[in-house]
Amino acid sequence: MVKVAIIGVVAIVLATQFKSQRGEYGTYISLAACIIILFLGTSKLQVIVDGINRIESYININPTYLNILLKIVGITYIAEFASSLCKDAGHGAIASQIELVGKLTILSISMPILLALLDLINDFLA
């Protein structure tokens, strides 16, 4: 985490310096820092996948549901990353649309889990 914080602070300082002279360089520096930080963050995904597999071994869960959960996490990170980049570049409207499509995508992907939960509740009450 210290490495990520240092990269972020250095990128902000450099981007701020370049924005006054050459604004596009500041955007490129921000983009590069975001990509580096994203790759550093994805290295933690193996720990998360191992944890989910361990949980799956403890309880009887359909592996499809865990795959959906991982897809939802991935969609969330991608939408947040793209939205933040658009906001930094001054395109708030596009950022809002990316966030909206991300939320709708998550809702559509999670529909099988919601329907299975409702079926379970219905069976329990019947």
Image (tube, rainbow, N blue to C red):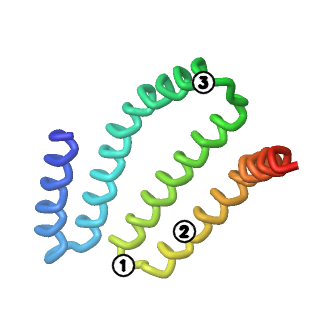
Q: Is label 1 in a helix, a strand or a loop?
A: loop
Q: Is residue 107 left or right of residue 93?
A: right
**Quarter where residue 92 is shown:** bottom left
Q: Amino acid at mark 1?
A: Gly
Which of the marked residues, 1 or 3, is nearer the chain's N terminus?
A: 3
Q: Is label 2 in a helix, a strand or a loop?
A: helix
Q: Residues within 10 Å of mark 1 (few under 14, many from 20)?
A: few
Q: Which residue is mark 3?
A: 56
**Quarter where residue 61 is shown:** top right
Cα distance in 3D space between marks 1 and 3: 43 Å
Location of residue 55 in the rendering, given as x and y in whole percent from the top left corner: 54, 25
Q: Residues within 10 Å of mark 3 (few under 14, many from 20)?
A: some
Q: Which residue is mark 2?
A: 98
At x 44% / y 33%, what residue is drawn?
A: 45
At x 39% / y 64%, what residue is drawn?
A: 85
Location of residue 114 in the rendering, given as x and y in whole percent from the top left corner: 73, 52
Location of residue 90 in the rendering, given as x and y in whole percent from the top left corner: 36, 78
